[in-house]
Image: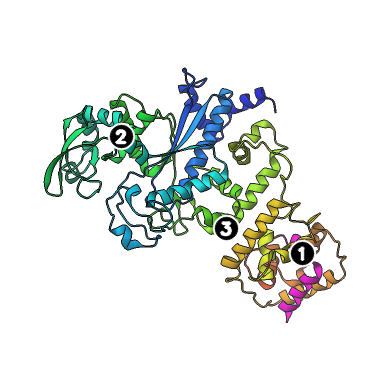
Amino acid sequence: MTEDALLSAAQVSKAWPFEEARKLLKRYPDGKPDGSPVLFETGYGPSGLPHIGTFQEVLRTTLVRRAYETLTGGAPTRLVAFSDDMDGLRKVPDNVPNQGLLTAYLGHPLTRIPDPFNKYESFAHHNNAMLRDFLDRFGFDYEFVSASDRYNAGAFDDALRGVLRNWQAIMDIMLPTLREERRQTYSPVLPVSPKTGQVLQVPVQVVDAEAGLVRFEDHGDMVESCILGGNSKLQWKVDWAMRWVALGVDYEMCGKDLTDSVRESGKIARALGGRAPEGMIYELFLDENGEKISKSKGNGLTIEQWLTYGSEESLGFYLFRDPKSAKSLHVGIIPRAVDEYWQFREKLADQPVEQQLGNPVWHLLRANGYHGGDGDKLPVTYGLLLNLVGVLGAGATREQVWSYLGNYVENADPAAHPELDKLVTNALAYNRDFIAPTLQRRKPEGGEAAALAALDEELAATSDDATAEELQNLVYEIGKDPHYGFEQLRDWFKCLYETLLGSSQGPRMGSFIALYGIANTRKLIAEALS
């Protein structure tokens, strides 16, 4: 496509990254007037192990960033992944070791708490490293910024003085939003106790805004202390607003649970002399029980869990879809996400530009600078792979799977099909952990046995090089024969899945037979009939 055609389509595209980017376009039609980069930010609280909900914000923001660059013809941009690691630990996560160690440090800044995994200098450093590792693995272009580093180095000192100067204005914004009991102790600034090192939730009086001096009660003693240089952090909504102003953030999205925070932080940003960024409020992820995913509960999928059972691309694809609708996030949705990603990727090259911009894969490929090429079709679906591996059993090996793929895939060599080879590894893990323990073949009932016998007879007379479509037609004809008593074809296919594969759902049987082999399929039928 030409650049003119791309720009014309992008200006009217209904794909959500372009709709979001057009908000920024109103603010900066050609980039910032001084030529500095438009700043995109994502925030992360490292109070628990990062899950996919954390990763999605970087991905989705990157998609908006690339859409804005497209609309402006390449205006400069930056993406900052900001870690709120100066927060005090409020609760010990359920899914980490050495719980007693963390309990002893409740209330301390996350970067000043020992790592319960004994790998990094602090708990926050451990969780930050996990997040950065995957962001790097996915190829994101971002700058990592630590709140502790900024506070400790004094980079936020001027902004902290601004908070002290505008103390009453901030209090006037915040106090009406709080319960009466909370109002009595609320302070925009949370001083770090000189005695214990904890982040204190206590009333604070401003003594000298320019010097950063405040007065507060520290475990029974009234003290005066300077809040600059890492000796304090700001209350959440004030901290968010301060960061927008101090860093000059132009775009930041957030979850639905922060709707009120966006409104109040926007007011505080204006009180500090700045303005709130553009942004999108997205729906939250739910676990398989419909409950909100929480870092402290550890009830969400980790990034590594998804990559054990599915591909990086499928993760991005799932996160792209419908950001303003609540989505379930559990291992059961991975196989479908893998296959849908490849369905959309196969369509991409033949779509006109308007449809390409609505194709999730177009956005995902451009997020990392890839614009398509060879290998855009997967020779075997992930669902079919899972069915094959399920029949082979929990002890199936990669080599064994590839020996069967030779029946179905041209040039069936892992080196020739690296994407498929990765999915073979994923399928073996998924089968081992979730499919093999649940498979249970049942005996055929009524006319089912006669139908299976008829299928066996037809397969015996069929050439080994029959196509998947020819085999599918053969299966259809038996299912449509009224002699066997199937009211609908779906009943026949359900019989095949349950008696041969041990599952209530399955693949196109013609494709499965072509992949598994006619002789092996006849053995399955014989086992079912016996």
Q: Is residue 315 left or right of residue 223?
A: right
Q: Earlier in the sequence, mark 3 or mark 2?
A: 2
Viewer-nearest residue: 46 or 30: 46
Quarter of the image with the N terminus in it: top right
Residue flagged by tag 3: what amino acid is it? Answer: Thr
Q: Where residue 308 is drawn, which disc sits there?
A: 3
Which residue is depicted at the point 37% across and 31% down? Answer: 244
**Residue 212 appears at what percent x and percent y?**
22, 32
Instruction: Characterize the magenta stretch by its predominant secondary structure.
Output: helix
Mark yes or no: residue 494 visible: no
Which residue is depicted at the point 12% across and 49% down? Answer: 220
Q: Is residue 521 magenta?
A: yes
- Quick one: which residue is furthest to the bottom in this view? 530
Viewer-nearest residue: 234 or 150: 150
* Distance in Å between CA atoms under marks 3 and 2: 40 Å
Q: Where residue 403 is drawn, which disc sits there?
A: 1
Which residue is depicted at the point 85% across and 61% down? Answer: 466
**Residue 291 appears at what percent x and percent y?**
41, 56
Q: Quadrant of residue 451?
A: bottom right
**Residue 446 appears at what percent x and percent y?**
69, 77
What colouring does the structure picture have?
Answer: rainbow
**Residue 100 appears at what percent x and percent y?**
31, 62
Segment colored magenta: 508-530
* Residue that label 2 marks: 264
